[in-house]
Image (tube, rainbow, N blue to C red):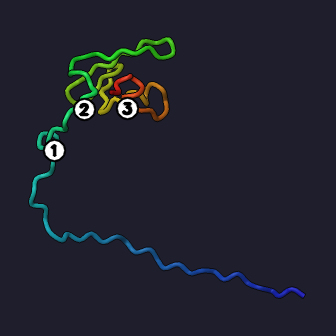
Amino acid sequence: MKKNTKKSVTKTAPVKPAVLRVVSPITQPENTVENMPARQRDNRLPAPGSIITKTYRGKTIEVKVLENGFEYEGKVFKSISRVAMTIVKRQVSGYVFFGLTK
């Protein structure tokens, strides 16, 4: 004989809307790009204005080094690793890919 067991239905509490409270007003100006301190440049990178060239799968790749980034195919990237990841379509160190290691 099997017992006739009912599955209990869990009751959920009604969803309450979020409440926004302002604890104290912001008195400091927001950080903008102009207010941010400049990062120290990595010594493995060539000087701004230089062009890094590499042959990858029979294609010559040229990346221009900018003051605050890198330009590849008309697009500006924040880091050399982002450029390398765009090229190889997977995670890779930009310094290793372009041979910029010490």
Quarter of image, res 55: top left
61 lies above or below 11:
above
Q: Position of residue 10 (x, y in %)?
A: 59, 80
Is disc 2 placed on a helix, strand or loop? loop
Quarter of image, res 97: top left
Q: Is the N terminus in the top left, top right, bottom left or bottom right quadrant?
A: bottom right
Q: Which numbered disc, 3 or 1, marks the residue that appears first in the sequence? A: 1
Name of the residue lying farthest toward the right: 1
Q: Where is residue 87 in the image (x, y as percent from the top left)?
A: 44, 25
Which residue corresponds to mark 1? 32
At x 13%, y 65%, the residue is 25
Which residue corresponds to mark 2? 42
Say what amino acid the circle numbered 2 marks: Asp
Say what amino acid the circle numbered 3 marks: Ser
38 lies above or below 17:
above
Marks 3 and 1: CB-CB under 8 Å? no
**Of circles 2 and 1, which is in front?**
2
**Of circles 2 and 3, which is in front?**
2
At x 21%, y 32%, the residue is 41
For the residue pair 35 and 22, the one nearer the viewer reads as 35
Q: Distance between the residues labelled 2 and 3?
A: 13 Å
Say what amino acid the circle numbered 1 marks: Thr
Q: Is the C terminus in the top left, top right, bottom left or bottom right quadrant?
A: top left
Is disc 3 placed on a helix, strand or loop? helix
Disc ID at residue 81: 3
Q: Indicate left or right for 81 with 42 as reference.
A: right
Q: Where is residue 95 in the image (x, y as percent from the top left)?
A: 36, 28
**Of circles 3 and 1, which is in front?**
3
For the residue pair 18 and 34, the one nearer the viewer reads as 34
The tally of labels here is 3
Is disc 1 placed on a helix, strand or loop? loop
